[in-house]
Image (tube, rainbow, N blue to C red):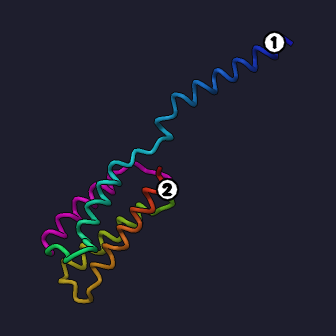
């Protein structure tokens, strides 16, 4: 009986230590995704006139770097989809945006980053 109690107490102590030390691993660091979202949102500017193509390119390149360098969160691929949308927007802007799709890509990237942030929290 005493052995069983000691084994259970040891098991609980080990699991408690494991969970307390692994808490930072499970906690989601969303700073980079937040910054990427803010930059994409500035490039989109849904409440007013969009920035110039040069400004959009600069904002999107910064957001792309942050999104690519962000920790691998369990966000169901939304971070990757946002990266692809940012790249598509950059390509559309580079080509002069003849189909007027850059705004759509930027809006989609913002939506994906917003979803990724909500899942990471």
Q: Nearer the viewer, residue 68 or 53?
A: 53
Residue 2 placed where, x, y %? 83, 10
Q: Quadrant of the N terminus?
A: top right
- The part of the image, by quadrant, that contains residue 88 is bottom left
- Main secondary structure of the magenta stretch: helix
Whether residue 79 is in magenta: the answer is: no
Spatial CA distance of label 1 from label 2 is 43 Å
Question: Which residue shows up at 28% across the image and 65% down it?
Answer: 40
Residue at 47% across, 62% down: 77
**Label 2: which secondary element:** helix
- Identify the residue at image location x=48%, y=38%: 25
Disc 1 element: helix
Check disc 1 and report the residue beneath it: 3
In the foreground, 101 or 118: 118
Sequence-wise first label, 1 or 2: 1
Q: Are marks 1 and 2 in contact (CB under 8 Å)?
A: no
Residue 119's tag is: 2
Indicate which label's residue lies in the foreground, 1 or 2: 2
> For residue 63: magenta?
yes
Residue 3 is situated, as x and y percent measured from the top left of the image, at 81, 12
Q: Quadrant of residue 59?
A: bottom left
- Which residue ends up furthest to the top in the rendered image? 2
Residue 56 is situated, as x and y percent measured from the top left of the image, at: 19, 70
Residue 121 locus on image (x, y percent): 47, 50
- Which range is magenta? 53-74
């Amino acid at each position: 009986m005493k052995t069983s109690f000691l084994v259970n107490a040891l098991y609980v102590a080990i699991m408690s230590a494991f969970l307390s030390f692994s808490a930072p691993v499970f906690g989601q660091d969303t700073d980079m995704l937040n910054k990427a979202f803010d930059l994409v949102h500035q490039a989109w500017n849904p409440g007013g006139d969009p920035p110039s193509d040069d400004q959009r390119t600069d904002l999107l390149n910064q957001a792309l770097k942050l999104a690519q360098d962000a920790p691998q969160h369990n966000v169901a691929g939304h971070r990757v989809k946002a990266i692809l949308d940012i790249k598509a927007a950059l390509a559309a802007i580079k080509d002069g945006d003849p189909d007027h799709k850059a705004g759509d890509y930027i809006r989609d990237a913002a939506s994906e980053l917003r979803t990724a942030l909500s899942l990471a929290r």
